[in-house]
Image (cartoon, rainbow, N blue to C red):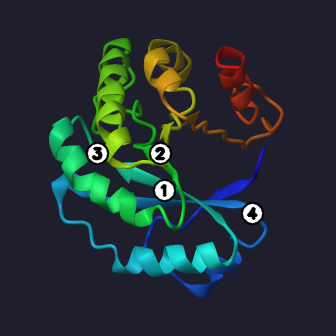
Amino acid sequence: MTNGVHFNNDLWHIHEEDFQKCIPFDSVLIIIAAYNGQQVHLDRQYSLCKRLHDMGKTLIFRIESRGFQDVARFVQQWAPILNSLLPFGDHFQINNEVQHPGEQFGGPSDHIALRYNGYFCELLTALRPLVPGARFGFPGLAVQQNDLAWWRLCKDAITLADWCGCHVYWQYGNYDDPQWWRRYELLRSMYP
């Protein structure tokens, strides 16, 4: 297992200290997001990716569909971008905490989980032939937001993915609690 860190979400205001914080970690997750189908401007992200890559970091990219979108449109927008990022890293997480009530997928219900399962499978099936060499990951889910049911209901998507993200949180003395910090153990027990 490698250790990693989530890079500064605000890619428009990056400081030297953001890079210094990455030094102890093997991998760095970076958001490459297009909200509501807007044009993605990657100049800043490319220089960021090059610098982190030159530091010897493994890069994991998080891309966002921001809700259920037309799969053909999503693939048309993202396939060229993902191909352009492959020199820096081949791991792509599609979306994040999709069942969180504040996200644009509709919340943590089982019905939405089943819908997302099909949507994710359709996206991956369409993206894979257009981005050869990419390794696609099922998104980390919001902890304590019906995530255990989502892991069960999204079995097809998780199995189809090359890897699966897992969010762990710790605060208030729950560092050793399998429901929080050791959450990844629950996921591994479901998908060895």
Distance between the alpha carbons at the discs numbered 4 and 3: 28 Å
Which secondary structure lies at badge 3?
loop
Q: Quadrant of the N terminus?
A: top right
**Which label's residue is closer to the chain start, 4 or 2?**
4
- Which residue is label 1 attached to? 61
Amino acid identity at mark 3: Ser
Whether residue 147 is visible:
yes
**Which label's residue is closer to the chain start, 4 or 3?**
4
Amino acid identity at mark 2: Gln
- Which residue is label 3 attached to? 65
Residues packed near mark 2 inside 10 Å, few (<14), some (14 to 19) or many (20 plus): many
Residues packed near mark 1 inside 10 Å, few (<14), some (14 to 19) or many (20 plus): many
**Which label's residue is closer to the chain start, 1 or 2?**
1
Q: Position of residue 53 (x, y in %)?
A: 61, 73
Q: Going by the picture, which residue comes out furthest to the right?
A: 176
- Which residue is label 2 attached to? 93
Distance between the alpha carbons at the discs numbered 2 and 3: 11 Å
Distance between the alpha carbons at the discs numbered 4 and 2: 18 Å
Which secondary structure lies at badge 1?
strand
Residues packed near mark 3 inside 10 Å, few (<14), some (14 to 19) or many (20 plus): many
Q: Quadrant of the C terminus?
A: top right
- Which residue is label 4 attached to? 25
Amino acid identity at mark 4: Phe
The residue that appears at 45% across and 38% down in the rendered structure is 97
Dots 1, 2 in contact, CB < 8 A: yes
The residue that appears at 37% across and 21% down in the rendered structure is 117
Which secondary structure lies at badge 2?
strand
Distance between the alpha carbons at the discs numbered 4 and 1: 16 Å
The residue that appears at 20% across and 37% down in the rendered structure is 71
**Which label's residue is closer to the chain start, 4 or 1?**
4
Left or right for 162, reference 70: right
Amino acid identity at mark 1: Phe
